[in-house]
Image (spheres, rainbow, N blue to C red):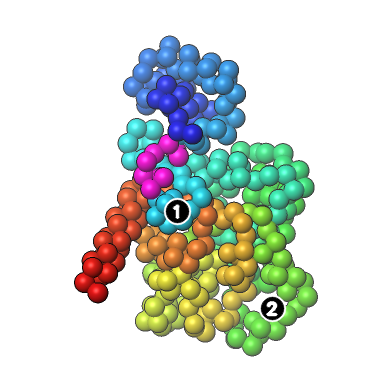
Amino acid sequence: MALRSAEQIVHKAAWLYYTHGLRQDEVAQRLNISRASVALYLRRAREMGIVTISTSTDLFRDDMMARQLEDAYGLDSVWMVSEEGLAHDAAAEIPTLAANVFLEMVHNGDRVGVAWGRTVYAMADAMSYADRQDVTVVELCGNLGSPYSYRPDQCTMEIARRLNAKGLNCYAPLVLSTEELARQLREEPVIREQLEGVSSCDLALFTVGTLNEDSHVIKCGALSLKEFSDIKRKGGVGVIAGQVITEEGTLLDCDYNRRMISADFDAIRAIPRRLMVVQEDEKFEPLLAALKGRFSTHLVLTSRMAKRLLDHANATQSKDEATRATA
């Protein structure tokens, strides 16, 4: 149910005061209201029981464009940070919003699969501590040997720590030197068991990576510049759990992917709730590919990115209708 205007201001005040730790005068300045009004709204927030911010994420779903995006791409839920009003920098607000959305989605007894990346690690850093019961956080892909600040094991264990959950790392490299070595390692019982168990997860958390010379997979040494050039020629546009995807969201047929230790795409898509978080504007093409590949059921993004996706969906629909009319 959409929030009424009177409820929106209460949620905004609670979000800024309790989640971001702004002083009441700073909240008043941000929302262009009096300090006395802030105090009133915060008291009302406590009376409504939203001071945990859990229902305040509804504020970011109360937008017609979010509903249109759900319909256009077959998503269950979309949360957007607008370029106006609550956030000075919409992209910077994404990790905090996504962390709160994620906490709402994690239930007691869940098995949660987590990929890696800067956005996921920023989410973990912004996440409140929650005492969930019998939750297991599982790494969706192999690890990086370099001292990289957004390693898969770090993302997994930090999120597990915030949830008071058990963390289960994948004790294998993300990418091997040869295809045969990767195949043999995937057959090792402990690795095979973890990869086969991905489809039994209740919830997945990941982002989609870019594929350019500044990509994480290149900076961390998983993918060489020579391999990158070859992969781009073959049609690679993005990265899911370390693996390269095409513009249609399928696994690219390349040597690099065959040397990966990562969850099978069908196993990831078998997870019933899949939260994808996208922060950067340059991820439009990778995100579009991920949506075509049905990797996401729930999505957190900026309103600017949402508009680009809707424009693309509308243009595609118009083109299809014109083609059918002339057929």
Q: Which residue is mark 1?
A: 278
Q: How many marks?
A: 2
Query: Which residue is identified by label 2?
Result: 186
Q: The residue tagged with tag 1: helix, strand or loop?
A: loop
When the figure is inspected, residue 292 is found, relative to residue 278, above or below; the finding is: below
State the mark number for residue 308: none
Q: Is disc 1 surrounded by few (<14), some (14 to 19) or many (20+) residues within 10 Å?
A: many
The mark that comes first in sequence, 1 or 2, is 2
Residue 265 seen in this snapshot? yes
Quadrant that contains the C terminus? bottom left
The percent coordinates of residue 14 (x first, y second) are: 50, 26
Q: Which residue is drawn at the image coordinates 40% and 82% (left, top)? A: 234
The residue at the point 48 percent across, 73 percent down is 250
- Farthest residue to the top: give it: 36
Answer with left or right where residue 320 lies relative to residue 152: left
Q: Which residues are magenta?
A: 60-68
Name the kind of residue labelled 2 in the image: Arg
